[in-house]
């Protein structure tokens, strides 16, 4: 199952790299909008660029439908496998070679996961570069109609930005790496402390299952904190009207 998920990760990386090249090409072609003197040719080029943006967005939608749930499942499997490997390495009396092989085996899947996150993050950045390019061109001294068209295209590009989603649970971007690693480290620390207390024969009601519950709770609490910060940054409606 995990090997199949790794193949799906390679497909996601391939699609992300392909779309990133398309968006970089769009950014490059946008420079021609200023260089072309004929208004009709300018409008035609802008129309072709918007059409290409829409095609890329459709590809993103299809990719999210096909791979979104599988990637979310892959993340869950990697997290559970990582927790099991940590518990196995800390609690069992297996030899060093066995523990090392278990860690290396899980690290391979973690590398695939990080590669997908980095590829998707680079794709999202290339999409924002296109939006910035539209605004940069619109800020120059050009025809008013062309300027309005560029601002409208910037809105389209922002709406159709390339974002891979894990079945709608979260967007795949580089901030997920910090959350993933911080929670794995938190679980490792909790497990090591529990093992140390067992060795010192200090009574402790926590069990391995409760340690995993602590890990899950830390994930949900971090998600709650992110939502709280996001809601705090929202501008109230009455302030917008004012």
Image: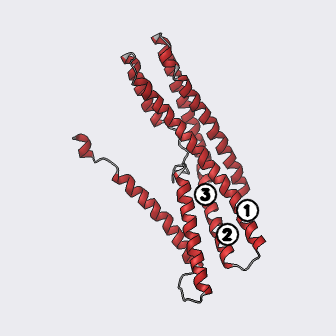
Q: Indicate left or right for 77 with 172 as reference.
A: right
Local secondary structure at mark 1: helix
Q: Residue 101 appears at what percent x and percent y?
A: 76, 66
Q: Identify which residue is drawn at 39% across, 25% down.
A: 139
State which mark lies toward you, 1 or 3: 1
Q: Residue 173 appears at what percent x and percent y?
A: 54, 48
> How far apart, in angstroms, are the residues tagged by discs 2 and 1?
9 Å
Q: Identify which residue is drawn at 65% across, 65% down.
A: 81
Q: Residue 224 appears at what percent x and percent y?
A: 42, 61
Q: Indicate left or right for 202 with 40 as reference.
A: right
Q: Which residue is mark 2?
A: 85
Local secondary structure at mark 2: helix
Q: Give the class, few, some or many, for how many residues have Cα within 10 Å of label 3's Cα (few <14, many ≥20).
A: some
* Between 71 and 122, the one nearer to me in the picture: 122
Q: Which residue is mark 1?
A: 105
> How far apart, in angstroms, are the residues tagged by discs 2 and 3?
15 Å
* Between 19 and 198, the one nearer to me in the picture: 198
**Of callouts 2 and 3, which one flags the residue occurring earlier in the amino acid sequence?**
3
> How far apart, in angstroms, are the residues tagged by discs 1 and 3?
15 Å
* Between 96 and 174, the one nearer to me in the picture: 96
Q: Give the class, few, some or many, for how many residues have Cα within 10 Å of label 2's Cα (few <14, many ≥20).
A: many
């Amino acid at each position: 199952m995990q090997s199949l998920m790794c193949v799906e990760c390679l497909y996601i990386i391939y699609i992300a790299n392909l779309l990133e090249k398309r968006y970089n090409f769009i950014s490059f072609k946008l420079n021609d909008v200023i260089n072309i003197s004929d208004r009709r040719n300018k409008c035609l080029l802008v129309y072709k660029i918007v059409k290409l943006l829409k095609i890329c967005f459709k590809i993103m939608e299809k990719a999210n439908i096909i791979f979104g749930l599988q990637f979310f499942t892959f993340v869950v499997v990697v997290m559970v496998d990582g927790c099991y490997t940590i518990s196995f390495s800390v609690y069992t009396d297996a030899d060093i070679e066995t523990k090392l092989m278990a860690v290396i085996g899980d690290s391979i899947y973690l590398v695939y996961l990080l590669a997908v996150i980095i590829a998707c993050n680079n794709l999202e950045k290339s999409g924002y570069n296109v939006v910035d390019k539209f605004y940069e061109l619109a800020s120059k001294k050009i025809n008013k109609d062309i300027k309005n068209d560029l601002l409208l295209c910037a809105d389209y590009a922002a709406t159709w930005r390339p974002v891979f989603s894990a079945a709608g649970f979260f967007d795949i971007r580089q901030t997920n790496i910090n959350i993933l690693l911080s929670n794995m480290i938190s679980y490792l620390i909790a497990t090591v402390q529990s093992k140390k207390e067992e060795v010192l024969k200090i009574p402790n009601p926590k069990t391995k299952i409760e340690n995993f519950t602590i890990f899950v709770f830390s994930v949900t609490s971090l998600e709650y904190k992110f939502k709280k910060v996001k809601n705090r940054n929202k501008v109230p409606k009455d302030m917008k009207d004012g």
